[in-house]
Amino acid sequence: MRPVTERRGYHQFCGVSRALDIVGERWTLLLVRDLLLGGRRFSDLLAALPGLTPNLLSRRLKEMQAHGLVAQRRLPPPHAATLYELTPLGRELEPVVFALGRFGARWLGAPTADDRTDPRWAMVSLKRRYVGSDRPRCAELRVDGLSFTVRTGGPAAELVDGAPTAAELVLAGPLRSFAAWIVQGASARALVSEGALVREGPAQALTDLARAFGLRP
DNA sequence: CGTATCTAAGAACTGTTACT
DNA sequence: AGTAACAGTTCTTAGATACG
């Protein structure tokens, strides 16, 4: 691959323009967003990003690997597949993606007919809202049948793909109910009492979880 | 068969240049 | 400053290949 300085680029001696030379191409930051919750296969990324074609995904992943943002990992059988995951350098883009999410939220409005939604995007949105908590909690969020593990209590929330081995709280429901809680500011207790969300585990754990993300308990 | 990648053609976009 | 024509670049589409 030609180095950034040879390709179309801004050719400015400035960190911002250099960063944009690397992550400013179409799809690159969306791929970073989709990899924030854990490694994904080529076909998963393709399915998650309609409009992104295989050859362009292949090219973007190669560029991201060449810049050290993404690494390939081969999964052993029986699930033999190539997994693409963020490197520690790629993870440094997390606050950038969060900041863009906050910036873009003011133009989000309600989803239109041709807007795609994805539980993972809601989870990224949740993760960026973490305000901290002194009560360590481990919860499973089951959004549209997809499980995610949430751990709070540290300086940053851990939020990854897949169910935890032992969760003290399980919160399950459709994406629109989670969106009502996370994005539209609805109360978790109200959503549970009207059946929009199903809670398994102590009510206090849900209250702690909500507070850890600055959401209404 | 599923996954990952590649090729070729054409469409769409972007930048450059010349002109008013 | 704004616009039009052209050229170059990037992206999409459709189909194919390599590999385990």
Image: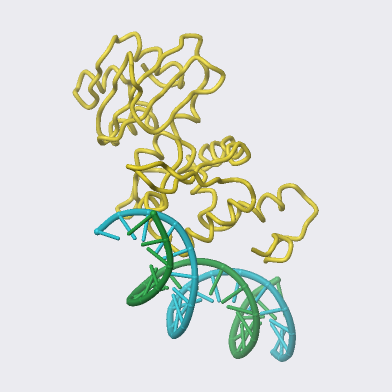
Chain colours: A yellow, B cyan, C green
Determine whether, in the image, residue B20 is placed left or right of residue A51. right
Outermost residue, right side? A13
Determine whether, in the image, residue C8 is placed left or right of residue A211. right
Q: Quadrant of the C terminus of chain A?
A: top left
Residue A119 pos. (x, y %): 34, 38
Q: Quadrant of the N terminus of chain A?
A: bottom right
Q: Residue A125 occupies which quadrant of the picture?
A: top left
Q: How many marks?
A: 0
x 56%, y 36%: residue: A94
Q: Nearer the viewer, residue A73 or A94?
A: A73
Q: Residue A180 occupies which quadrant of the picture?
A: top left
Residue A163 pos. (x, y %): 33, 27
Determine whether, in the image, residue A175 is placed left or right of residue A43. left
Instruction: Examine the rendered structure and indicate whether residue A93 appears above or below residue A185.
Output: below
Residue A89 pos. (x, y %): 63, 39
Q: Nearer the viewer, residue A178 or C9?
A: C9
